[in-house]
Amino acid sequence: MKLVLEEMCVKAGVKIQLHTQLVGTVVDKQKRVVAVITESKSGRQAWLADRFIDCSGDADLAAQAGCQFDVGINSQCECQPMSLMALLAGPDPAAISDYVREIAGEKAKSNLFKLMKSAGINPSYSAPTLRVLHGNIYSLMSNHEYGVPAYDAGKVTEATIRARAEIHQITSDLRKLGGPWSDLSVVATAEQIGVREGRRVKGRASVSADDIVAGTKHADAVCRVNFGFDVHNVRPGEMFSGQDEIEAEVARYRKLGAKAYDIPVGALIAADVDNLMMAGRCISGDFIAHSSYRVTGNSVPMGEAAAQVSVASLKAGKMPHEISWPVSQQS
Ligand SMILES: Cc1cc2nc3c(=O)[nH]c(=O)nc-3n(C[C@H](O)[C@H](O)[C@H](O)COP(=O)(O)OP(=O)(O)OC[C@H]3O[C@@H](n4cnc5c(N)ncnc54)[C@H](O)[C@@H]3O)c2cc1C
């Protein structure tokens, strides 16, 4: 995917600069972003543009620009846990088929959890997922890091160190089971711990959990979502345990059920700054709705829509919120 995306961008003439962090913005008196400030090996740089799209997941750009945002489910900002992904190698998938998601299906997770428990392993994620990717190469998701703010580099670092240690410990303990597991080893851990949830920027429109229950449709939809509620637990404990008021609220929505619903273009347009759009998991919505719309299949059309609206607004000499969607209808 990295190769395909790079090829597409190069072909389209997109200027890319890797290994570069956005650290600030310049906002003018009309509340428009004039420039973003980045830091990298090249030092500090300012990037000027007339339109900006925040695809940082954590809404770093919007937050730096002074936009209002929400985090998590309550005033303590309790949010979804982070997970560090790992690549493992070794066993023949047929020899451990009961534990491989692609072979045993959904029950592979509970099978693996039980196996881990029997081996004295107590994973921080109670639905550990082993997927075979290619030959004898697997991905493993087996850890949850709770209560880590996505925008606190120190805490994200501590979470990463704990998660990496846990992955190596789990792998080492599984190896001790012997048989097909004796070949199991860690090939790589992810470059960056996986962040499920960061800031959700206040938009011109928003997506709510009730929209998902009702299956709300919009004439200005950028995509139709068919993915249900996916809240990993917010505090340590087994998934779907109903252990506290947060779990009870999530369980209530899960029971009500999700219907196909639309993301309106306004959820991608920042309310507080005129020339800024968002795409991906940082768009405007509530905690429970976010658990559904945040996934990859929705992030992609959001990115396409944000780009189309930005370009159309430039061509029309208007702001993104003044552009009607779909863009093709007015051009
Ligand atoms: C462990 C895990 C498993 C998941 N499994 C699935 C799954 O099976 N299917 C599915 O569809 N979804 C899954 N998701 C959800 C999905 O990956 C995300 O919701 C989706 O990637 C969100 O896309 P995004 O582009 O908004 O954010 P991200 O994918 O998080 O991308 C944001 C990018 O911005 C960069 N960035 C952040 N801040 C800055 C900054 N200040 N300066 C420069 N760059 C910055 C980050 O490095 C990152 O590359 C999973 C998520 C996690 C964490």
Image (cartoon, rainbow, N blue to C red):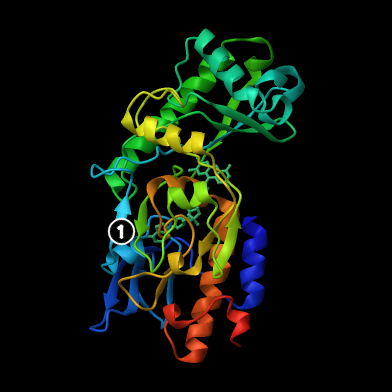
In this orientation, does residue 123 appear?
yes
Residue nearest the observer in this picture, 143 or 109: 109
Q: Which quadrant: the C terminus?
A: bottom right
In this orientation, does residue 15 appear?
no
Q: Position of residue 52 (x, y in %)?
A: 42, 74
Residue 102: image quadrant is top right
Helix, strand or loop at label 1? It is strand
Residue drawn at x 51%, y 52% as measured from the top left: 293
Residue nearest the observer in this picture, 199 or 74: 74
Residue 133: image quadrant is top right
Q: Position of residue 49 (x, y in %)?
A: 41, 81
Compared across the picture, whether 147 is left or right of 285 comes to: left
Residue nearest the observer in this picture, 188 or 232: 232
Q: Is residue 275 above or below residue 197?
A: below
Q: Position of residue 191 (x, y in %)?
A: 48, 45
Q: Is residue 306 above or below residue 75?
A: below
Compared across the picture, whether 81 is left or right of 216 comes to: left
Q: Which quadrant: the N terminus?
A: bottom right
The residue at which mark 1 appears reads as: 69
Residue drawn at x 40%, y 25% as measured from the top left: 242
Q: How many marks?
A: 1
Q: Position of residue 182 (x, y in %)?
A: 63, 15
**Residue type at numbered disc 1:** Phe
Q: Is mark 1 within 8 Å of ligand 1?
A: no
Q: Residues within 10 Å of mark 1 (few under 14, many from 20)?
A: some
Q: Is residue 185 above or below residue 74?
A: above
